[in-house]
Image (spheres, rainbow, N blue to C red):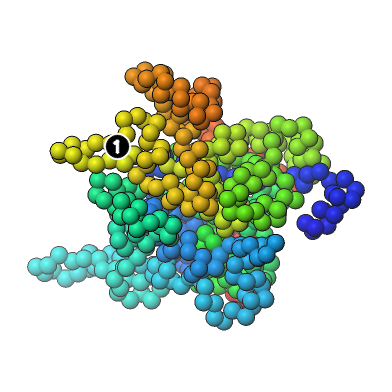
Amino acid sequence: MYWFRKWIKLNFKLLDMNVRSQIAMVFHLDKCIGCHTCSIACKNIWTDRKGAEYMWWNNVETKPGTGYPSKWEDQDIYKGGWAKDGKGITLRMGGKLKGFKNIFHNPNMPVLDDYYEPFTYKYENLFTAPEGDDQPVAIPVSLITGEPMTPKSGPNWDDDLGGSKEYARQDVNMKDLSPEEQEAMFQLERMTFHYLPRMCNHCLNPACVAACPSGAIYKRGEDGIVLINQKKCRAWRMCVTACPYKKSYYNWTTGKSEKCLLCYPRLENGQTPACMQSCVGRIRYLGVMLYDADKIYEVANSEDHDLVEQQKAIYLDPNNPEVIKAARANGIAESTIESAQKSPVYKFVIKWGLALPLHPEFRTLPNLFYVPPLLPTMAFVKNDTYETTTDQFWGAISKSRLPMRYLASLFTAGNESAVETVLKKLMAVRLHRRDVTVGDLPATEVKDAMRDSIMDKETADAIFRLTSLPLFDDRFVIPPAHREEAMEMLESTADTKGNSGFGFIEKPKRGL
């Protein structure tokens, strides 16, 4: 289809843009406090069922760290995402033919130990234990076998362990850092970490969709949400291998794969997803982005250092008359276009250039973007006094405790200048607001910061407003649902909670 539309464009000049709408998100990492409220909200609504105990569609990781499942970023182990192959891209796992050969033995499939064996506690021991001199305890038991066990890992097992040898030092993003840089990171007075909330990115070029042999995974036409048709799913589990973010899971009770569905029953009723509604730090933003679907292959095939800018280029200006005209011609509703014009995601990603995709080198073109954390500067202890190594706030960017190369490995496929540009913009906003509210900084320092980051005062105030003082409707701009176009017509999820968790009229059955 891509090449057909390309041929039409070149020969007949009839189709300028294949405009589609996509629900996209921004997470502001400077505001995340690692409370895991988002994870618990998602767990209580969607995955508190038998077979889904180990599933955390939303989880919060500590970086540096190995994450959940363990070392999910290392595609030498899991073979997820896409890879450049000559002039094109192919699934790293090898495509559907190789997938069929690995049906009965897939060496790149994560096993339960890479996640954790789900467990609970035998609380009845606290109430039924016979009278004695010792204190009864609630021993942990496996939710799979029911046998007593010793928990050894979990979805946030490395929580806050930013300097540990077992977790932080095993972070895949450390591979490009020199031994000296790694050692400097873990000196006690220089140790640092930040939180990384993760969920399904609902990518523009999802590897899970391409890898599914039964065609059960698809992107909804009206908003780009990636879903799994439980009736068509045959549990090949190729989606688990293909997803580089490891956000597709296998339910060992129903024999089906499951994943985050962005709480679309809530979205269709004008409500925000549960993880975003419950976010204590208010770090989450959701809105509509318009994009040119004909550019997906071209963008995904870009060189590593160009991936971030090329992905930004695929998103279209919702205020451009030509874009609006093409969107209408493609059947996009007026209400969706208006929502795209008010989208906070468009402001963070395109207008201000502050948000970056997670591991763009996976080439799935994720629609979850992150504002990188503005970490403390390097410091040292001298004469029992804690001192920073810079006299100016502006100098803190290049001397961050976390090496720029580490952040670049996370967000820009190694492009350090792109990360530095974002951090300078964030610092310029801080300096401007400090100058406005406190006024204790040298005028030249603030002026130089604004000039170097190419930012005016109005933009800095707008960024501050949407970051620090946003209203609920500023953070979440949800287009009204058009149920006449919806591809999923479900019963109330609350009425069928505990069966399959999705509210299907017919309960999914194993196999055929």
- Comparing 261 with 326, the one in front is 326
Residue 480 appears in the figure: no
Number of marks in picture: 1
Label 1 crowding class (10 Å Cα cut-off): few <14, some 14-19, many 20+? few
The quarter of the picture where residue 165 lies is: bottom left
Residue 164 position within the rendered picture, expressed as x and y whole percent measured from the top left? 29, 58
Q: Which residue is mark 1?
A: 389
- Residue at 39%, 52% (x, y): give it: 63
Q: Amino acid at mark 1?
A: Thr
Location of residue 434 with respect to 100 vertically, above or below: above
Residue 122 appears in the figure: yes
Residue 273 position within the rendered picture, expressed as x and y whole percent measured from the top left? 53, 46
Residue 197 position within the rendered picture, expressed as x and y whole percent measured from the top left? 45, 50
The quarter of the picture where residue 436 lies is: top left
Furthest residue to the left? 133
- Residue at 51%, 25% (x, y): give it: 451
- Work out which quarter of the rendered image holds the N terminus and state it: bottom right
- Residue at 56%, 53% (x, y): give it: 360
Location of residue 109 with respect to 394 vertically, above or below: below
